Image (cartoon, rainbow, N blue to C red):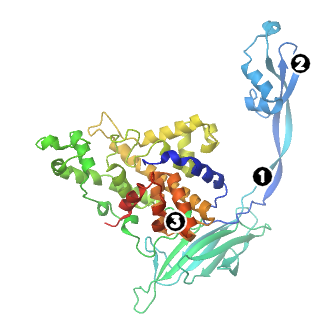
Amino acid sequence: MRAALHVLGAVIVLGVLFAAQALKAGQVLAQESARKITIVEPYTEYEWWLLGWSDSAVLCRILIDHDGLPTLNEVAVDCGQELAGKWQVTPPCTYEEARLCRGVYLFHASTAPKEREVVVTLPSPVVWVNLEGCAPVPPTNFCASLPSLVFTTEEPLPDYQILSIQGTYDDEPFFCQGETCQLPLRTSPPLGSTIQFWANSSYGDASPQYTAQVRVIETGVTPEPGGEGFYVNVISSQWLGDTLASCAAIWEAFPPVGTPPAWLSTPDYFDLLASEKPYYYLAGRLIVQGLVDASDCPSGGMLPNGYADACGLDRSRPLLAEWQNQFDQRIIEVSQDTGVPAQLMKNLFAQESQFWPGVFQFPFEFGLGQITEQGADPILIWNQDFFNSFCPLVISQESCDKGYLGLNERDRALLRGALALQASADCKDCPTGIDLSNANFTVSLFANTLIANCSQVARTIYTATNQMAGRLVTYEDLWRFTIANYHAGPGCVSYALHQAWDQSNSLTWETVAPNFTETCKGVVPYVDQITKEP
């Protein structure tokens, strides 16, 4: 990620302002649970006084519910910031020196058993969806006949049960008694049909209202002569079937009907991902590290810019093929785990680093995907699961609980720096100069970074159009915008998207690409190179 990362500015702020409003994919109108009960909880109350050393006057009372001294924050709440600050800077003072002491001190006044009312929120009913009559397998999701959408429910409270399931299918109501419901599907428009659903409980309330986007496209292909076939896709937070291609749920965008284009594919076997590209930069690194002997070539097989020349490339070919394919198995494993297409990741690594994860050409870009410290922002902002797991490894859990944007700039910088260094694979003591095990490990990091960029693109499109990304933009073009966001930064992408929407009320790669500014326009050939068909 090289260009325009310094332009995060306005777009990140804008995205953050809207982030709290973002709908979780597949769930709408999620009602706050009405299941609240009040219980009486016993606890121990500790009363402390803040006294002045000069006259032992009681300046304020502090009530807490834990052993030990009150925290600075607890003192500030009960006594105010000024007294809390005074207490913080008052040095220890013995009783014998009391007449000479200045400032304030804490005195434990009493301990007493107490009771308090606590409001407890009980879990709500949940509805899940799956298919019956077909178990479609990605990427084609083919069904020989029309399946049904099956709703199953969970009532977490004992002594209560689900009475019924109801909802709408393209605004047509449906209703089922009991804990399960079977809804026959029909063919849909290309953008799919909308199904809203919820469950009613004997507790007297209902589950949140969920939604599913269901696309059923007739193919005319079936094992039975004269029969029909269908491509069936479901997008919902409540979906129990095979995971959709990554980012589809974020965008609420269906993948291409049938087989995806090659650059968005994930082979079943790593040898199908193999390539034999003539990477001059990679060849140069192999020669410099002494992994390839090109001493019989003019200039040692090297050009002044650190790339191999034609002779050096020729000498490097046997190792070149082996090196560029050594990460394939890990790429496919990560793809199967995250849903990010394997071929897309490999193409991106080829563009960013030519599979040499060490630092050379750009000193502050790291790993197979050449992430920068500034480029770590999206994954820390937009991939909450990653942030929650990574943050406590670097700073305190208490600080992490504030969220990335709640941290001070010092802690944010620590996280960005730690993330960038984690992607680094340089190793002086390794035979190749590269820690290959760490390079393989960080494939997952780059996949999660792409997912974060998917979320950022979805928010940028919503900001520009007030519509969900999948309602306006094809799955393929959404990936193109995501790749652009990863490489050039959200400032470049946001400007181009807003301009295209204002000019044409259309968001395609063809309408957006001409609107990148002079500083950002280098991203266009970058995206075209990654997404071109082999």
Point out the frontmost of discs 2 and 1: 2
Q: Earlier in the sequence, mark 1 or mark 3?
A: 1
| Label number found at residue 248 | 3
Q: Residues within 10 Å of mark 1 (few under 14, many from 20)?
A: few
Task: Work out how far the residue at label 2 is from the one at label 3, CA to CA, in angstroms.
Answer: 65 Å
Q: Using residue 296 as the reference point, say whether residue 378 is left or right of it.
A: right
Asked whether 224 or 44 is in front, the reply is: 224
Q: Which residue is mark 2?
A: 57
Residue at 82% across / 41% down in the picture?
42
Residue 469 in sight from this viewpoint? no
Q: Which residue is mark 1?
A: 120
Which amino acid, by three-letter code, is at mark 1? Val
Point out the frontmost of discs 2 and 3: 3
Asked whether 472 or 58 is in front, the reply is: 472
SS class, disc 2 = loop
Query: Residue 295 appears at what percent x and percent y?
Result: 13, 40
Which amino acid, by three-letter code, is at mark 3? Ala
Which amino acid, by three-letter code, is at mark 2? Ala
Above or below residue 209? Residue 365 is: above
Query: Residue 241 appears at what percent x and percent y?
Result: 52, 69
Q: Earlier in the sequence, mark 2 or mark 1?
A: 2
Query: Residue 200 appears at what percent x and percent y?
Result: 74, 71
How many numbered discs, if any?
3
Q: Earlier in the sequence, mark 2 or mark 3?
A: 2
Asked whether 66 or 413 is in front, the reply is: 413
Asked whether 14 or 383 is in front, the reply is: 14
Residue at 54% across / 83% down in the picture?
187
